[in-house]
Amino acid sequence: MSLLQRKYGCWIVGGVAFDHKMKALRYASETNNTSIEFYYHNNIWDQFDRKLLGKIPLTTLYKERAQQLRDTYDHLVLHYSGGSDSHNILDTFITNNIKLDEVSVRWAKPLRDGKFYTANNKDKTARNGVSEWDYAIKPELDKLRATHPEIKITLVDFTDNLDTGIVKENNLENRIMDLNFYRGCLATLTQRLDPSIENKSTIVSGKKKIAHIFGIEKPYVSVNGNNIDICFQDSQLDGTIMPRNYEEESVEFFYWSPDFPILPMEQAYQLALRIKNDEATREIFCYEHLPLNDSIRRVKVDAMNQITKQVLYGDSWDFSKFQAGKPNGSRSDWWFWLHESSELNLLHNNFIQVMKNLTHGIDSRLILISQDTHTLVPTRTKFFNLLKIT
């Protein structure tokens, strides 16, 4: 099979395709070509008939996608974060009476026990993302247990083995390469450091055909001159890394799928209409020119996310529900306890050293360097046009 047909995308540098991002970055640096592209079924979005857009309500498409997954697999596991993307999936299954077998939540037990923080629903900064357990996730799980006891709930603690040899440098390096990092954050690695976490993410055993469903992120819609375009960014898949299940092709992106291309295109189209018809929204979506650490950029991104939720999930999302702001590039604010806890100093320090080792020789333009980590620059597909503003 050509890498261009790989279910989870690939990276292209100078016409050469790679199935591993780190290898692509290294080749780009060796050939002095930093024009690295994430290729995600480009032919499908290029050839998609735009005349189909605006005809079918998003709620109908969500239902059809859920049914498609139900018809394809024996056991459906929704990886639930409490955010609007995964919550909309949960609501879609329940509202349309489509059987969902399991909800899996990856959340450290020390956090569930209240360690490292005091729950607070007033602070909406990314650093208080830990409070989403208390105000967004646990209440929904309690409700689910009461109203749909047939849906199994699996809580995954990824901190079980962090005090063992698993945090040694050589193990970290091997695991990072196994995971095929998209962004390279400490949080991504820690949640998947122990390979057995994949098995703990579902309680099903046997030979059933299992789908691991992820909501990932919303469409990446951009204003480029007079055009409104969509692209797909690799870092948006960061939370879905499950090597064994990737190999088995059992990880399913609910919204992004070459098997149901109308869904991401319709989501993006609805956002594009809002941008086209509302000048204030258009101004909010124009932020790419601002530096990553610019406070105005952060304000715009937060406002953009609120608008996106209104357009895409207005029927399923409770806008009064607590949700923290988006994290920084290295997620050192959202996952502050991983970066700052004295108990995890060895993990943190070894991670930084390993990332330095792995990125040695890679062009600095392809790495985001901070005091917390050396994260990889997100890479995107090319832009696909949706509509013109005028």
Image: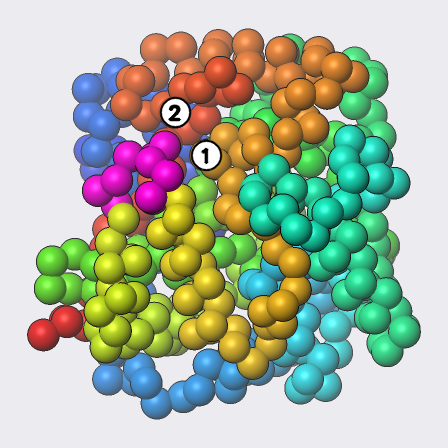
Q: Could you tell me which residue is drawn at 24 percent across and 54 percent down?
A: 286
| Residue situated furthest front in the rendering | 122
Position of the C terminus by quadrant: bottom left
Which region shows up in magenta?
Answer: 288-297
Circle number at residue 329: 1
Residue 323 visible in image: yes
Q: Main secondary structure of the magenta part?
A: loop
- 139 displayed left or right of 330: right
- Mark 2 belongs to which amino acid? Leu
Residue 291 is covered by the magenta coloring? yes
Q: Could you tell me which residue is drawn at 36 percent across and 52 percent down?
A: 300
List the residue tagged with mark 2: 368
Residue 246 visible in image: no
- Mark 1 belongs to which amino acid? Gly
Q: Could you tell me which residue is drawn at 21 percent across and 37 percent down?
A: 15
Q: Could you tell me which residue is drawn at 82 percent across and 25 percent down?
A: 161
Q: Is 349 rendered above or below residue 81?
A: above
Q: CA distance from mark 1 to mark 2?
A: 8 Å
Q: Is 383 rendered above or below residue 321?
A: above
Q: Secondary structure at mark 1?
A: loop
| Crowd band around label 1 with a 10 angstrom C-alpha radius: few (<14), some (14–19), many (20+) | many
Q: Position of residue 317 (x, y in %)?
A: 60, 72
Q: Is 142 rendered above or below residue 21?
A: below
Question: Which quadrant of the view contains residue 292?
Answer: top left
Q: Considering depth in this image, is 138 or 364 the residue closer to the camera? A: 138
Q: Secondary structure at mark 2?
A: strand
Q: Considering depth in this image, is 373 or 111 the residue closer to the camera? A: 111
Q: Is 186 rendered above or below residue 171?
A: below
Q: Are marks 1 and 2 in contact (CB under 8 Å)?
A: yes
Q: Position of residue 115 (x, y in %)?
A: 83, 33
Residue 180 is covered by the magenta coloring? no
